[in-house]
Amino acid sequence: MTDDVLLERVLTPYKDHCKYLRSAVVTETDGRAFARCEFEIPESCYIDDTGHLNSVEVNICFNQMMYYLVARSVRDGLGAGFADWTLDDFFAHQLPDILIARFAANFRRPVDPRAFSGELEFRSVTRRAPAGGSPFLYAETAFRYWDAVSGRCDGEATLAFVNVP
C-alpha cells in the first residue's frame, strides 16, 4: 500500500506538473526490494503531445519510482545496502548524492502516458570502497513499464550512491 505522506515528501523536489508517480506498492523477495507503481502524465512537461511515453518521461518516472523505493527500503529495513541509513539521511542525499551511472531503455511498443504501470527491482546493492576513494553504494536495477493495451518499455540502470552515511 502506498504511504501517501512519504510519497508526497519524496516528490517534493519535483514541480507540480512533473509529479507522475501516483501510487506504489513495495515488497521484498529474497532480500531484493521491488516497487509496483501507477503513473499518469496528463501533459508532457517539456514537449507537445507525442501520444506515447518518451525517453525523458521514462527517466523521470524511473527517478520517482527509485526515490520512493529507496525511501521505503530505508524506513522499512528492506533489501540490502541501506541498513545504516535513516529517512533523514535519504532526504539529505536524495538529490545531490544518488547518481545514475548508466541508464538503458528498450521501447518495445508505444506506452500510453495518460495511464500506465511500472515496476522497479533492486537486483543488488553493494558497498564499495575504491583504493584511495570514498565508499559508495553501487546498485543494479531493472525496470519496466506497460499500459492497459499492449505498450511496453523495459530497461536497466546502474546507480551510485556517493557520500554515503
Image (spheres, helix red, strand yellow):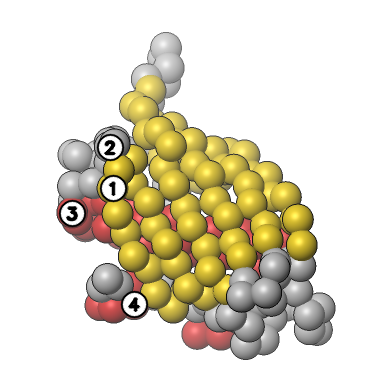
Can you identify the residue that label 3 sits on? 76
What separation in Å lies between label 1 and label 4 (alpha carbons)? 22 Å
Type of amino acid under label 4: Glu
> What residue occupies the far top of the structure in this picture?
131
Q: Position of residue 79 (x, y in %)?
A: 27, 41
Asked if labels 1 and 2 touch by Cβ distance under 8 angstroms, the answer is yes
Asked if labels 4 and 3 touch by Cβ distance under 8 angstroms, the answer is no
Q: Nearer the viewer, mark 2 or mark 3?
A: 2
Q: Earlier in the sequence, mark 2 or mark 3?
A: 2
Disc on res. 62? none
Can you identify the residue that label 1 sits on? 28
Q: Nearer the viewer, mark 3 or mark 4?
A: 3
Q: Is residue 83 left or right of residue 50?
A: left
Type of amino acid under label 2: Gly
Disc on res. 8? 4
Badge 3, how many Cα within 10 Å: few under 14, some, many 20+? few
Q: Secondary structure at mark 2?
A: loop
Q: Secondary structure at mark 1?
A: strand
What separation in Å lies between label 4 and label 2 (alpha carbons)? 26 Å
Which quadrant of the view contains residue 116? Answer: bottom right
Q: Position of residue 126 (x, y in %)?
A: 36, 28
Residue shown at 37% from the left, 34% from the top: 125
What separation in Å lies between label 3 and label 1 (alpha carbons)? 10 Å
